[in-house]
Image: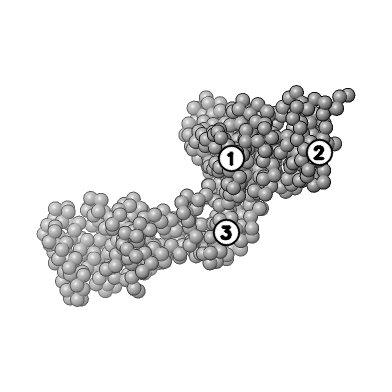
Amino acid sequence: MDSPSQHTTNHISHQDGGSVVQTGLVHGDIHVHGVRVGPVPRQLPPSPAHFSGRTGELKALTDALTGTHREAPALAVVSGPGGVGKTALAVHWLHNASERWPDGQLYANLSAHGPTGPATPVEILGDLLHGLGVPSSDIPPRLAQRAAAYRSLTAGRAIAVLLDDAASTAQVTSLLPASPKSVVIVTSRRRLGGLVAYGGVTVPVDVVSPDVAVELLGRAIGRERVAAEPEPARNLADLCGGMPIALHLAAARLATRPHLPLARVAEELADERRRLRALVGEDGTSSVELCFDLSYRGLPPAAARLYRLLGLYPGGEFGTGVAAALAGTSEAEAEHSLAALADANMITDAAFDRYGFHDLIRLHARHLAEQQEPEAERERAVWAAVSYYRDRATAADSVATPLRPRRGAVSTEFGTRVAALDWLERESPNLIACLRTAFSRRRYELVCQLYDALWGLFLYRGHYAEWLSAGVLAVEAATLSGASGVEVRMVNQSAAVHLRIGEPAEALEPYRRALGVARSIGDWAGEATALEGLGAATHACGRLAEAVEYYRNALELNETHDRPRGTALSTAISATR
C-alpha cells in the first residue's frame, strides 16, 4: 500500500497536547493521522413534510448565512421555546440551500434536554469527526486534539453544520469549523448571547400565525377535510396556540382517525385543564407537556418559582413590578429571574420590561403552580398582583384627575397627566383582567377600587366598551357588598358612559337609582352628581324643563354644602346645555 505522503499535495501538521494531527488533501480525499477519510457527509435529518410559512425567518437565515467576504464561518442562532419548530426551520433552509455547500452537511444533537443531560464537546467532536469519515480508532481521545483535527478537516471547505438543541455557548464554540466558506446553524431554547462574539446572528422563532397554523393542519390531514370544517379548524389552530408541536400532535390524531370530526377535537382542547394532556402522541413519549417540562427543569430555583407564579397572573403582558409582587421579592430579584426565563424562551419579551406568555406555556406554568404551590401561596400571589395594579392605577388616576375628591395626596410617581394616562392606557387590559378576576372571586371591594381608578382613563381616552362592561361588574359588586355609598359612586360612574356615547335615555334609570340610594343614606355629594347626570340626560333627550329643575337642585346642593368645584360644574353644565 502506498503511504499517504506519497500523494499529498498539501500537508499540515498541528502540535496539540503532545500529539501531532496531520491532514492532507490527496486527490480530493482527506487524511488524518495518515488515514484516508470517507465520502462527502450528508447527515441532515429529512426535510419536514408539512413545513409551512416562516417566510420572515427563512429570509433572516438567508441574510445571515449567505453574505460574502467573511473571515469566519457564518453563524446563525435559531432560538425559541420548545416545540416551536426551530429544528424544522433549520433543516428546511439547509436542504433548500444544499448546493451552496458542496463539501457536505454535518448534524449533531447537542442534547441540551436529552435524558442524560447535555452532550460534552469531546463527545460531539467525536461524532463530527466520524461524520467526516475518520475511523473511530483514529479519533484522538482529548478535547484539544479532537478540536484541532476538526479544524484541520474543515479548513478551506464549504460545509454546512447543524448543531441542534444547544445548552450553552461553551458547548458550541469548539464545534465551529475553521473555514469562512462554511455555515453553522445552532438551535437552542436559550438565546446564547455569547455566540455574538463569534459572529452569531440571532434568528428568533415564535409561534406561527393562525393562517399558517390552518395551512399546516390542512397539509397534514388533507385540505378537503379542513375545508369541510373551516370554523372548527380555525378553533383547533387557535387552541394549539400556533405551536407546531401541538398542531402536529393534533393532526396525527386526526390523520389516523379519518372520521373523527375536527369539532370534537377542538371541543376537547377547549377545556384548559385537559388541553396539555390531550396533546400527546400515540406512543406517549412525545407531548407538549413533556416538551415544556424539559425546559422548566433547567431553570434556576428562583426563576422556576416565578415561572409557576406567573402562570396565576390574571393579565396578559407583565413587567418587573408585578412580577416582584407575585413572587414577594425585590424588583432586582424579579428582574434577574425574568432575564433567566427570557433567556430560556419560557417567556417572550414584547418591549423593554414587557414580557408575556405563549398560551400553552402559560397553561403549563399554571398547572405547575397548582401542583407545587400551596393554596395559601397561590392566593397570596394573585391578590398581590391585583393589589399592585390597584395601587398603581390609583396613583396614576390621582395625577390624571387631580381635582377629584379622594383620600390622600396626589401621587408624584408619574410626573405629568399625559404620562399617567399613557400608563393607564397601556395597562388597561391588565387592569380590566384584574377587575374581572376580583369579581369572579368575590373580592368586591377590589373590583370597585379598580373601576374607580379607571375613571380618568375613561374620561379622557374613551375605551367605551371597557367602560360599559367593567361598569356592569362594578355596580353589581357594590350592590353585593352592601356598601351603599360605594354603590352610588359606581352607578354614577357607569351611567356617565351613556352620555358620552350618545345614549342619554340609557343613562336615566341608573342616575335615578343613584339618586334614590344617595338620598336614603344622606350622601349629598352622590345626590348632586346624580342630579347633574339627570340634568344632562334629560336635556339631551329634549326635555328642557326637567333638565333645568335637575340642574337647579344640583346647584343648590353644592352651594349649601360649600362645594366650589361642584357649584362650578353645575353652573358650567347648565350654561352649556
- The image quadrant that residue 51 belongs to is top right
Tell me the residue at 56%/56% (across/down). Answer: 339
Tell me the residue at 49%/30% (across/down). Answer: 229
Mark closest to the chain's N terminus, 3 or 2:
2
For residue 562, above or below residue 97: below
Mark closest to the chain's N terminus, 3 or 1:
1
Q: How many marks?
A: 3
- For residue 487, the mark is none
Amino acid type indicated by mark 3: Ser
- For residue 76, the mark is 1
For residue 20, above or below residue 353: above
Amino acid type indicated by mark 1: Ala
Residue 459 % position (x, y): 28, 58
Report the Cα–Cα distance between label 3 and label 2. 42 Å
Residue 434 % position (x, y): 44, 58
Look at the numbered discs 3 and 1 and tell me whether their residues touch, using CB distance below 8 Å.
no
Look at the numbered discs 3 and 2 and tell me whether their residues touch, using CB distance below 8 Å.
no
Which residue was labeled with disc 3? 337
On the rendered image, what quadrant is the N terminus found in? top right
Residue reaching furthest to the right: 1
- Nearest to the observer: residue 132 or residue 514: 132
Report the Cα–Cα distance between label 3 and label 1. 26 Å
Tell me the residue at 22%/53% (across/down). Answer: 504
Which residue was labeled with disc 2? 139
Residue 449 % position (x, y): 38, 65
Residue reaching furthest to the left: 545
- Nearest to the observer: residue 446 or residue 315: 315
- The image quadrant that residue 570 belongs to is bottom left
Determine if residue 217 is in view: no
